[in-house]
Image (cartoon, grey):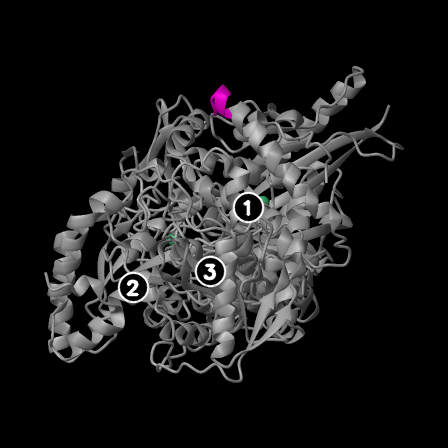
Amino acid sequence: MADLHKLTIAELSEKLAVGECTSVEIVNDVLAAIDATDGKVGAYLTIDRSSALEQARAADAARAAGKKNPMLGIPVAIKDLLNVKGQSCTCASKILEGYVAPYDATVIAKLRAAGAVLLGRVNMDEFAMGSSTENSALGQTRNPWNLGHVPGGSSGGSAASVASDEAIASLGSDTGGSIRQPAAFCGCVGVKPTYGRVSRYGLTAFASSLDQIGPITKTVKDSAILLEAICGHDKLDSSSIEMDVPAFGKNLTGETSLVGMKLGLPKEYFVEGMDPEVEKAVRDAVAHCKSLGAEIVEVSLPNSKYAIAVYYIIATAEASANLARFDGIRYGLRVDGKDPIELYGKTRAAGFGSEVKRRIILGTYVLSSGYYDAYYLKAQKVRTLIRDDFTAAFKQCDAILAPVTPTAAYKLGEKTDDPLKMYLDDILTTPVNLAGNCALSLPCGFSSGGLPIGLQIIGDAFAEETILKVGHAYEQTTEWHTRKPEIS
Amino acid sequence: MPEANPGMHVSDIAHLARIDLTSEETALFQSQLDQILHYVEQLNELDVGGVEPTAHAIPVYNVLRKDEIGQSLDRDAVIANAPAATGGQIRVPKIIDQ
Amino acid sequence: MKYEATIGLETHIMQKTNTKMFCACKYEYGAEPNTHVCPVCLGYPGALPVMNEKAIELCCKAGLLLGCEINPYSKWDRKNYFYPDMAKNYQITQADQPLCLGGQVAVEVDGEMKTFTLERIHQEENAAKNTHVAGASLVDYNRAGTALMEIVSNPCMHSAADALAYLTALKQIMEYGGISDCNPEKGQIRSDVNVSVRPVGQEKLGSKVEIKNMNSFAFIQQAIEYEIDRQIEVLESGGKVVQETRGFDSDRGETFSQRTKENAHDYRYFPEPDLMPVKISAEQIGQWRSELPELPVQRRERYVKELGLPEYDAGVLTADMATSDWFERVMVHTRNAKAVSNFIMGEMMRLLSEHGLSIAESKVTPEKLAEIIALIDAKTISTGAGKQVFEIIFNEGGDPKQIVEEKGMAQVSDDSALEGWADEAIASNPKPVEEYKAGNAASINFLMGQVMKASRGKANPGAVMQMLKQKLDG
Ligand SMILES: [Mg+2]
Ligand SMILES: [Zn+2]
C-alpha cells in the first residue's frame, strides 16, 4: 500500500497530474483502507468495487487523453440520500428497500463530468433526521477518534469515512447542521453552502427550504475544490441560483494573513451548558485569527436562541409532506393491506424508524387544521427575525466565528432516549440553515479525551469565498488538521 | 399558541400521517412530543406583529421552463421498482373511497 | 314553503400544453400506461418540480378571457392527502394566492341574460388514472402531473339550467381561447358541484353538499336536479341536510353519500418550498391580452352586424368553434354569408349527424362549398341542384364544376330553349291560361311547373317566370 488514501484531493491531484500515481492505484489504496478499518468504523453501507475501479480506469484514460480537472480520478464517498443511477438509495431506511435510482442527482452528474470516482454509499441518520447517525436503520457508524463515541450526524458516514482515510472526500447534506456537526465531531472540514448554491435535484428531501448538499473533506482547500465541482445553476431545481461559480479551489493560494478582515463574535453563541474545553478551543481560535491580522468585533444574533423551536416546526412540517411519498405504492417496501389506507399505515409503520415517525407526527400536527397559524406561520415569522439578525451582523463584519457544537462527540447511546436533549445540540448550526447563508466547520482543537473540536465560520449569503479564505488561513497556521486518529 | 396542546393526540395525528403506531409508541411519542411542544412555546415571548413570514431562504421569482418535451423513464425501470404491477400498471389493493 | 337552490361549480380544465405542469413528460391522451412518466411525476425521492411557462400563460389568458384580474403575485402550496393517484401524496396547487381573481361568465338562460361571477382560477396538477379490476386497482401515471386549472365560481347559480348554461359558455370560451380542447370524454373538463337549498327569504345559505368529479354535462344536470329535490324533501320532512360529499350514480340518476364533514380531509396546506412565487407584470398582461382570440360573443355580434346574418344563424354558427372557424374559411371565398349559413345549418349539419362525423372530417371543404355557392349565384345551377352537388361531394368527394357537367345539372337560361317549352305549356293548357288572364295570378305556377318538368328541372326558374309573364301579359 502506497498510503495514497491518506492524502488530500489537492495532493493527489498534483501526483496524478505529474504521473506519480494513477486513479486505479488511489482507488485500490482506499479500498484496502476500507477493508482494514471499516469493520470497526462502519462508515459504508454499500461499496461497488468493480464500478469504482472501472471509473478509475476511465479517469486514467481520460487524463491520458488530455482531460484536466482537480477532481479527475479522485474517489468520493456519497451520502446514501443522493440518487445515483442504477444504485440503491436507501436514506438508511428500511422503507426504500429494493429501490433502484433511475437517474443521477445533479451533483452526481457534475462529479461524473469532472471525472470523480463514485466509491460507495455511506451511512447517515435515517432520512437525515438525527445528529449522531444512531438513527440509521442499516448499521452503526462509530467515531474514528473513539469507537465508543458517535460520529455525529446526520452525515456521520461521510465524516467518519474521511476521518478514517476510507475516502478522500465525501458529499454530505446539511439541513440543520448535518455536515458541520459530524465534520466537527470527526475532525474534518465541512461546508454548508448558501441555499441555492448547489442543486438539490436528486437529493432525497428532508426539509426542502433548508437542505443543501456540501463537501466533507480533510482540508479547507479540498472543500473548496469539491464545492466548486458541485456548484452551479441547475434548471431542474427552481431554488438553484443563477450565478457564476467562483474558482473556489484556485483562489486559495496559501495566504495566511487576515489583515483587513473583520470577524464577528456573537455573544449569544457561547451557550449555557457548553463544555468549557469547547469554549476555550474556540476562543483560542478567535485569538489566533486576531494574531493573523483580523479585527474581532462583537456582534449580536439575539433571535438565534429561538432557532431550535423554529427549526423543529419548519423542518418537520416540510418533512411530513416530503416523506408522504414513501407509501409502498410505486417503489420500496410494501406491507400489503386490504385497501390502500391499511397498506399505507402498515408499510410506514414497518418502514420508518422511531425518530422519523416522531418527526412526521410533529410536522403533521403543526400543519393541522387550527394549529397552522400558532405553530407554522409563527415559526416562519421568527425565521424572518433570525435572518434579519444575520443581515444586520454582516453589516459589521465579513464573517462570524462560533463553536459548531456545545460539546465534543458524546458516547454512543448517551442521548438516544431524550430527543429534545439531542435537538438542543443543534442550537449553533440551525440558525444558518434558517437564514440560508453559508458556514464552514474545521478542527480547532481536541478535548482532554482526545476528541476533535470544531470552529464554525459563518458567512453571508454567497460569501463562500470569504469563509474559505478565513478557514484556509487558520488551517495553514495551525496543525489540528494534520492529526490522524488511531483506530483501534 | 395553545397552552397545553389540547389538540395533540398522537393517535389521531398518526392516522392523518398514515402510520400505524403500537400503543407503546403512541404513549412514548405523546410524552416526548408534549415536551417538545412545551419547549416550542417559548416562541410566544416574541411579538411578530408586522413580520413577514419566510417561506424561501432566497428571494427568487418566476423560475419557469419552456413547454418542451423531454426524456421520460423507461417503463421497465419504473415497473421493476414497483412492489406489484400488472400489464405495465402499478397494482394496489382495491381503492375504496376514503 | 318555497325553496331556493344555490349552486357553485369548481371546474377543472386540462390545458393544451405539450408537457406536464412540473416536468418535461409529454401529455398524450390514450398512450400506453406509464410511458410518459419520470422521477418528478412519479414522486421519486429527490425529484423536484419546475413550472411550465405555457401553462401559466394559458391560465392567465383564460383569466383574461373571463374578465379576471391577474394576480401580480401568486404562490404555490402543497395540499396533503394520501391517495394512490397522487404520486407525492400531496398536490401542488395554489391556496391563498391564485393566478387569477374574480371574473365572470355572461350567458343567456331561457331568454334571460345572466352574469355568473367567479371567485378565482388557480393552477394545479392533475392526478393519475386509476382503473379497477377484480380485487385490485391499477394506476397509470401518464396523466399524473399534467397541467390542470381550477375555475371556481361563486355560489351564484340557482338551477340546473343555470349551471348547464354556465358550463356550456365556459367550455366554449376555453375552446375559442385555445386554452383547452375541453373534451369531456378525455376528462379535459370535470366539475365538482356544490348545491344547497334554503327557504326563500332566509339569508343564511343551507348546508352545502358537494358532488364530486363529473365530466358529463348531462349527468351534472341530472345530479343537480336530483340533489335539489332530495334536499327540499329532507327539509320538508323536518330533517336537516347533512354537509357532506356525495357521488353521482349515473345508472340510477341519483346522488349517494360518500363522506361526511366529520370524516373530511385535513389538507394541511402550506407553502410549497420547491417552487418560487410567480410575479406577473402589467407589460406581460398587456402582451397576453393583445394575443387573445375573438370570443364567441364577439363573433356572433360581427356575424350579425358585418355579415348581415340573422341572430339565430349567428348563434348556431358560433356555438362550436370548429363550425365557426369552418364558416370563416368559406367566407374567405364568398360574400354570400346567408347561403353559407344555410348550407352549414342545413345540409352540413344533417349529413354530419347522419354519419357521425365532425366538420373537420367533411369531404366538402370550405373552398368547395364556396364554389357550389358561386355556381348557384351565377345561376349556373339551381339551389336544389346545389344541394345535390353538396351531398355527392360529402359522400364521394369530387369537384363541383365537374359534377355539374357530368350529371348535366346546369340550368338552361337560353331563351330559344325556354321559348319552346313555354309555348308548348301555354298551348296545351288553355284552362290555367284562361284563369290567369282572368286575374288569378297563381295559375301561372302550374304553367311554370310544366316548363320545369319539360326541362327536367334544368330550366332557370327566374327566366321561365319572366318568359311566361311576357307571353301571357303581352
Ligand atoms: Mg383543486
Ligand atoms: Zn414526468
Q: Report the amino acid beneath label 2.
A: Ala
Question: Mark 1 to mark 2: distance in Å?
Answer: 36 Å
Residue C364, percent across and down?
A: 42, 60
Q: Secondary structure at mark 1?
A: helix
Q: Secondary structure at mark 3?
A: loop
What segment carries the magenta color? B21-25
What residue is at 52 percent from the left and 65 percent from the top? A283
List the single residue furthest toward the right.
Answer: C201
Disc number lying in front (1 or 2): 1
Q: Is residue B29 visible?
A: yes
Judging depth in this view, the residue of A112 and C36 nearest the camera is A112
Pointer 2 indicates a residue of which chain?
A
Pointer 3 indicates a residue of which chain?
C
List the single residue furthest toward the front.
Answer: A448
Question: Mark 3 to mark 2: distance in Å?
Answer: 19 Å
Dividing the picture into quarters, in which one does residue B37 lie? Answer: top right
- Give yes or no for residue A37 being in the magenta stretch: no
Any mark on residue C50, and which?
A: 3
Q: Report the amino acid beneath label 1.
A: Leu
Residue C311, percent across and down?
A: 69, 58
Q: Report the amino acid beneath label 3.
A: Val
Any mark on residue A335, and which?
A: none
Q: Is residue C336 visible?
A: no
Disc number lying in front (3 or 1): 1
Identify the residue position indicated by label 1 in the image.
Answer: A424
Identify the residue position indicated by label 2 in the image.
Answer: A109
Relative vertical location of residue C237 with respect to residue A318 in this rendering, above or below: above
